[in-house]
Image: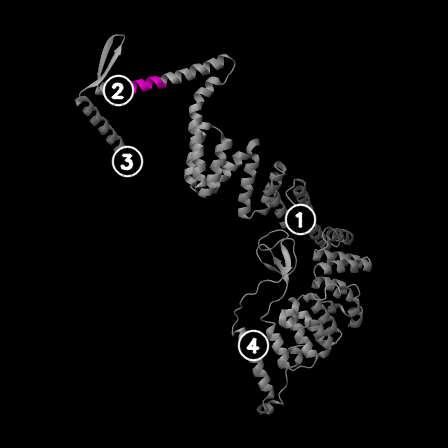
Amino acid sequence: MLWSLIKIVLFVVAVAAAALGAGYLLESEGGVQVTVMGSEYTFGALQSVIAIIVLVLVVWLLLKLLSLLAAVWRFLNGDETAISRYFDRSRERKGFNALSEGLMALASGEGRVAMTKAAKAEKYLRKPELTNLLVAQAAEMAGDRRKAEETYKKLVTQDATRFVGVRGILKQKLADGDTETALKLAEKAFDIKPKHEETQDVLLRLQAKVEDWSGARKTLSAKLKYSSLPRDVHKRRDAVLALSEARDILADESSIEVQEKAIEANKLSPDLIPAAVMAATSYIRQDRKRLAVRLLKKAWEVQPHPDLAAAFASIEPDETPSERIKRFAVLTRAKPEDPETRMLLAELHIANEDFPEARRALGDLPEADPTARSVTLMAAIERGEGASDAVVRGWLAKALTVSRGPQWICDNCQHIHAEWAPFCENCESFDTLAWKTPPMTEMAMPGGVQMLPLIVGALEDKADDPTQEDLADEPEIEDAELLPDDDEAADAARTVNGGSDTSPETTKAG
């Protein structure tokens, strides 16, 4: 409404200005004198202006006529589309101008403007393979998903734009969380353009999400084939998929296939800890213990891990604690200064009830690099050596404030996982879990963790206070409620793994 009013006002102003100019020219003196073949022609000021305008129009028409004659000449010489191109040239110019304006509007975030320009471009160009793509993207930007989906379906019907249409619908289904339909669309897009890297990644992620490990390995091989993935990365991720496939087969109790897949995964990536554990387990089932020892030792040299120690312990489950210490020397000599090795040695000596040796093995780890596991081990050592309950409580109180130690953490979103998985359960990224220590953050707990040392000190003072003799006849709290007795101190280390029994001494003989 406002724009229409502005146009009317501008038209009236233009007419008034033209009338004013014409009146001024009529009242002015002089003009233009033209001599042609001895004849003189005199034009007034207004007549001169009109003559100039007419001359420009004549020249323009003459140029148009020459262009038409040139098109006719080309047509007569065999160019059957010359005349049609002549008449379509103006329409194409207007259409491409509208298309370029639509693209600029799309880049500027003006979805509605881009849709209007796309409709204008389609009117002049009649090339839906160009304009429909602009309409679909503009509709998505404007929030009109129905229009976008309809346009993408139109693109699917044409060979030249089929991939673009499938990809557009795929993105919509991913946004809706429709994994099943998205997987089918990703497979279709991959069939059309197997070299498209984004389609490869989407298909691989969806296949891993629905645990189609065999299909995911084929997609991964395609990424290697089309040079969109380095060979070493392909080898590592293929091992992850082989391991995941083996774990699924294990759930179906197909032991022979499990062994083959587990060993294959370990050969593809010897540093993959879950693969090493599963492969070692398969060797143990086959009574090939020397191969299991060699495999676990190689993995331990790359990265010591509690699961490797637990698998190593299961090779000889009935050995005595002293025999186990001697056998574990194969691992503990590999990386003696690694915190995992030191804690493993401490656990072994605690199981053997050699608490001074356990303290020497642990060294300054509880003070220099304290974790919940090392601090709890120190509490078990203190308890085994006969320290007071206050000292033991002090170590256990410290375990609440220190880091839990290395865990399976996603490199992409830093989400912590209870156990290894092929993809992150939070951000769904593939092969991003690493065994490392998460960054420490300040914890807010009711009452304040800072009060724990004061509480422990108060308990110690209370135990030493002679005025408490009247409570001597009261039943005492059993030590087992705080920490196991001397003969059970070896089991204290079980509490440091978040409830998972992965320490090697848990398999020792009763």
Q: Residue 452 carries which label?
A: 4
From the image, tell me which residue sits under label 2. 50
Q: First in sequence: mark 3 or mark 2?
A: 3
For this rendering, which residue is in front, 128 or 457? 457
Question: Do the residues bearing badges 4 and 1 touch, measured as CB atoms within 8 Å?
Answer: no
Give the mark, 4 or 1, whose residue is nearer the N terminus.
Answer: 1
Determine the CA span between mark 4 and mark 2: 102 Å
Write down the residue under mark 1.
233
Q: What stretch is highlighted in magenta?
A: 48-60
Answer yes or no: is residue 157 visible: no
Residue tagged 3: 6
Instruction: Give the amino acid at mark 1.
Output: Val
In the rendered image, the quadrant that contains the C terminus is bottom right
Q: Earlier in the sequence, mark 1 or mark 3?
A: 3
Q: Is residue 414 magenta?
A: no
In whole angstroms, how far apart are the C-alphas of marks 2 and 1? 78 Å
